[in-house]
């Protein structure tokens, strides 16, 4: 019998995740906020639905997308960069009853290491630490995590990804050639899309539920060393960092994930 998973949010990360699971023999139901992308999802073999959460309401047939699935990957970014007034927690609260009334028994909620604040001490962050977000996005993600963990209708695992990189996405492109950049000595916390996908698969395939995992590749070079090296290797203008002020940041520790999943990161952050 083919296993079925629902994925809410088949974008830059969600779509290749769906394709990976399909390649492993899973049947996938997935959502997009754009009707123009429905054909793209269908061509990938995804049973696709147009679902949009905005202005205190849900547009689209969420119930149909969840129907007959026992596992849900919820992969919706807060979106506060585009809309600083967006109520992400409110959107998740709207979605929660649909999940509770569905056949979903396990929820994998994609969160972010932004739930941990940066600090001058450049702390090493583990899951045992109490998050103290210093951004609106981090605060809303943390509140959403609590919302889903509180539900008794399904088991929830929280997966906190570091900054996402991939073949067409890297912060070095944005930082290239810029001057007076802050935090030259802060550790770099990034994770490649292929590792994100494989970690999600390992969690679901291995039934690692009711857990919280940090996910960031290693090693953790300094921002100045790493981005200078990446830009140089790509033939991009070198960024210049401010060296006259104290760096703030954090180093994300993924040892719990590595040990529980017996996982080895495929993409290392070597200079």
Image (cartoon, grey):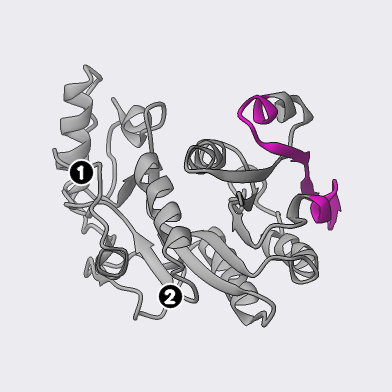
Q: Residues within 10 Å of mark 2 (few under 14, many from 20)?
A: some
Decide if residue 160 is on the left or right side of residue 181: right
Q: In the image, residue 221 lies at what x, y percent?
A: 16, 48
Image quarter where the C terminus lies is top left
Q: Can residue 253 be seen here?
A: no
Q: Position of residue 71 (x, y in %)?
A: 61, 61
The reply to whether residue 148 is in sight is yes
Span highlighted in magenta in the image:
40-64
Question: Is mark 1 in CB contact (under 8 Å) with mark 2?
Answer: no
Name the image quarter holding residue 269. Answer: top left
Instruction: Indicate whether 48 appears above or below 55.
Output: above
Q: Quadrant of residue 152?
A: bottom right
Q: Is residue 78 above or below residue 166?
A: below
Residue tagged 2 = 131
**Disc number placed over residue 269 in the picture, else none:** 1
State the residue at coordinates (22%, 36%). 227
Verify whether residue 44 appears in magenta. Answer: yes
Q: Is residue 176 left or right of residue 229?
A: right
Q: Residue at x 35, y 46 (%)?
A: 195
């Amino acid at each position: 019998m083919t296993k079925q998973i629902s994925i809410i949010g088949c974008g830059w990360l969600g779509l290749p995740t769906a394709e990976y699971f399909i390649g492993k023999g899973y049947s996938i139901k997935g959502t997009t906020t754009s009707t123009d992308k429905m054909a793209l999802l269908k061509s990938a073999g995804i049973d696709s639905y147009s679902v949009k959460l905005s202005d205190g309401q849900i547009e689209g047939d969420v119930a149909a997308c969840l129907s007959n699935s026992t596992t849900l990957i919820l992969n919706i970014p807060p979106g506060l960069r585009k809309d600083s007034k967006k109520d992400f927690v409110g959107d998740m609260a709207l979605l929660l009853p649909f999940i509770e009334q569905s056949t979903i028994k396990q929820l994998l909620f994609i969160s972010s290491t932004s739930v941990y604040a940066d600090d001058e001490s450049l702390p090493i962050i583990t899951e045992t630490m109490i998050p103290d977000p210093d951004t609106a996005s981090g605060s809303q993600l943390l509140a959403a995590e609590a919302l889903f963990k509180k539900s008794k209708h399904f088991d929830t695992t929280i997966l906190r990804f570091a900054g996402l990189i991939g073949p067409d996405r890297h912060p070095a492109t944005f930082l290239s050639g810029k001057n007076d950049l802050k935090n030259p000595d802060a550790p770099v916390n990034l994770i490649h899309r292929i590792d994100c996908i494989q970690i999600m698969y390992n969690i679901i395939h291995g039934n690692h539920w009711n857990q919280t995992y940090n996910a960031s590749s290693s090693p953790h070079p300094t921002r100045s060393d790493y981005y200078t090296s990446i830009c140089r290797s790509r033939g991009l203008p070198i960024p210049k960092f401010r060296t006259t002020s104290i760096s703030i940041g954090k180093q994300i520790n993924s040892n719990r994930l590595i040990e529980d999943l017996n996982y080895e990161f495929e993409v290392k952050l070597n200079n």
